[in-house]
Amino acid sequence: ASSVEIRKVDKFYGPFQALKQVSVSVPPGKVTCLIGPSGSGKSTLLRCINFLEEYDAGEIRIDGRLIGYESPGGKRMGSGKLRDMRRRIGMVFQQFNLWPHMTALQNVAEGLVQVRGFSKAEAGARAAEALRKVGLADKMTSHPGRLSGGQQQRVAIARAIAMEPKLMLFDEPTSALDPELVGEVLNVMKQLAAEGMTMVVVTHEMGFAAHVGDQVAFMEAGELVAVDTPAAIFHDP
Ligand code: ADP
Ligand code: ADP
């Protein structure tokens, strides 16, 4: 399981500062929940971790290795090196981003062939295993259009875990779901946490943050205003 070290990160969108001197340590094998009002910079910070978003100052290190730049404040990392660093980072978005013309199995297997270079047979076997893990053994040949939102999101999680990530990033993974489908996705995430996956989760699900989070980071207007145990963050004074 990977660790992430975020130190004094700034991020600007033009003149607007979306992240202000953000520092937080994400320990290996633990769940870090990012909470805070809409627009406070949670998604931006998450996207900086895998360099989907460039940060302007500070350092983000994954297992001690700087991501995105050759050195702090230096030139951008080459695309090959960046791809190499991203290989073991899984990401799950609010929107499931599945290919509608492919079955659940094909959706999961595709990356294993394209990115990891497995044979079709090996990719299929690994994809099936990942889908079993998220409770979708009986939906392998279904297309996304025939699946519920919760099932589609579980396919998206299976697609990520099939790549054997050492770090999983979740950006409001249950926000697009009908309330009755939220639990099945949270339970899969809880199972991953129990297996010792390092996870950073942007979420509005305070029950999940309180009960599954090892630490909770609270953001406000681009600043990380508190990082502590759920008990300390949610404690009513
Ligand atoms: P959160 O995830 O907490 O809702 P975001 O990280 O999405 O917040 O956004 C933080 C702030 O940065 C918001 O004010 C948002 O409008 C702004 N922002 C996000 N993405 C962009 C962008 N691509 N261009 C300009 N401003 C952006
Ligand atoms: P709901 O709002 O549906 O009651 P919560 O937001 O309280 O759910 O909880 C969300 C998720 O957090 C649950 O699906 C479960 O995985 C986990 N969770 C909630 N309460 C507990 C608890 N007491 N112990 C362990 N996990 C819990």
Image: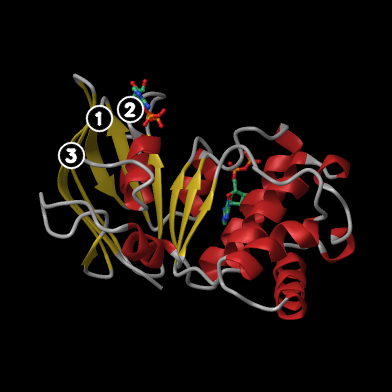
Residue 122 is left or right of residue 223, and the answer is right
Q: Which residue is mark 1?
A: 222
Q: Which residue is mark 2?
A: 40
* Mark 3 within 8 Å of ligand 1, using the beta carbon: no
Q: Is residue 100 above or below residue 122?
A: above
Q: Tell which circle, 1 or 3, labels the residue nearer the N-terminal end.
A: 3
Q: Residue at x 18, y 39 (%)?
A: 56
**Which quadrant would residue 1 be assigned to in this image?**
bottom left
**Residue 150 in the image, given as x and y percentages of width and height:** 74, 45
Q: Residue at x 63, y 56 (%)?
A: 157
Q: Tell which circle, 2 or 3, labels the residue nearer the N-terminal end.
A: 2
Q: Residue at x 72, y 80 (%)?
A: 122
Label of residue 56 in the image: 3
Q: Which amino acid type is marked by label 3?
A: Asp
* Mark 1 within 8 Å of ligand 1, using the beta carbon: yes
Give SS at disc 1.
loop
Give SS at disc 3.
loop
How many marks are shown on the rendered structure?
3
Q: Residues within 10 Å of mark 3 (few under 14, many from 20)?
A: some
Tag 2 near tag 1, CB within 8 Å: yes
Measure the alpha-carbon separation of dots 1 and 3: 14 Å
Assign the C terminus to one quadrant of the image. Answer: top left
